Image (cartoon, rainbow, N blue to C red):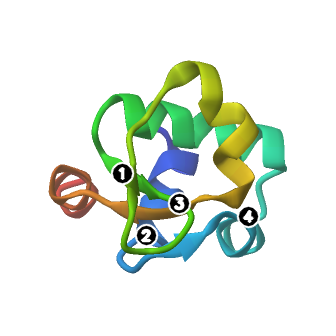
Amino acid sequence: MTDPEFDILDELYFVTPFAALRQKTGLPAAELTQHLRSLLERGLIRSYWPDPDTELAYEESSFGALSQDCLFLASKEGLLQHNTR
């Protein structure tokens, strides 16, 4: 897990929108999207859209277009990896 990914997971103990995550991590939007994509592919986070109760299945082809509208939350596996680092 990279340092930026660790910092992202640190903010995802609660459902967090992309804009708030970008502000808290200080990462540029493109870089944040890249890290979120990596975390989603490994099952370390979950994405939600259009509301915090509707989980969005990760699709590589459409994620880039939707990423800035999504909300994110660490998965159980993501929390375990974050806490054992």
| Helix, strand or loop for disc 1 | strand
Name the residue that disc number 3 marks: 49
- How far apart marks 2 and 4 lie (CA) works out to 12 Å
- How far apart marks 1 and 3 lie (CA) works out to 14 Å
Question: Which is in the foreground here, disc 3 or disc 4?
Answer: 3
| Helix, strand or loop for disc 2 | loop
The answer to whether mark 1 and mark 3 are in CB contact below 8 A is: no
The answer to whether mark 1 and mark 2 are in CB contact below 8 A is: yes
Is residue 10 or residue 68 the one in the foreground? Answer: 68
Mark 1 belongs to which amino acid? Answer: Ile
Mark 3 belongs to which amino acid? Answer: Trp
Q: Which mark identifies residue 12?
A: 2
Residue at 63% of width from left, 28% of height from top?
62
Q: Compared with residue 50, is residue 64 higher up or lower down, i.e. above or below?
A: above
Mark 1 packing: few (<14 Cα in 10 Å), some, or many (20+)?
Answer: many
Q: Compared with residue 19, is residue 40 higher up or lower down, i.e. above or below?
A: above
Mark 2 belongs to which amino acid? Answer: Leu
Residue 18, quarter of the rendered image: bottom right
Q: Quadrant of the N terminus?
A: top left
Residue 26 locus on image (x, y percent)? 78, 64
Residue at 48% of width from left, 27% of height from top?
59
- Which of the two discs, 1 and 4, labels the residue nearer the N terminus? 4
| Helix, strand or loop for disc 3 | loop
Name the residue that disc number 1 marks: 45
> Can the viewer see residue 1 in this picture?
no
The answer to whether mark 2 and mark 4 are in CB contact below 8 A is: no
Q: Which mark identifies residue 22?
A: 4
How many marks overall? 4
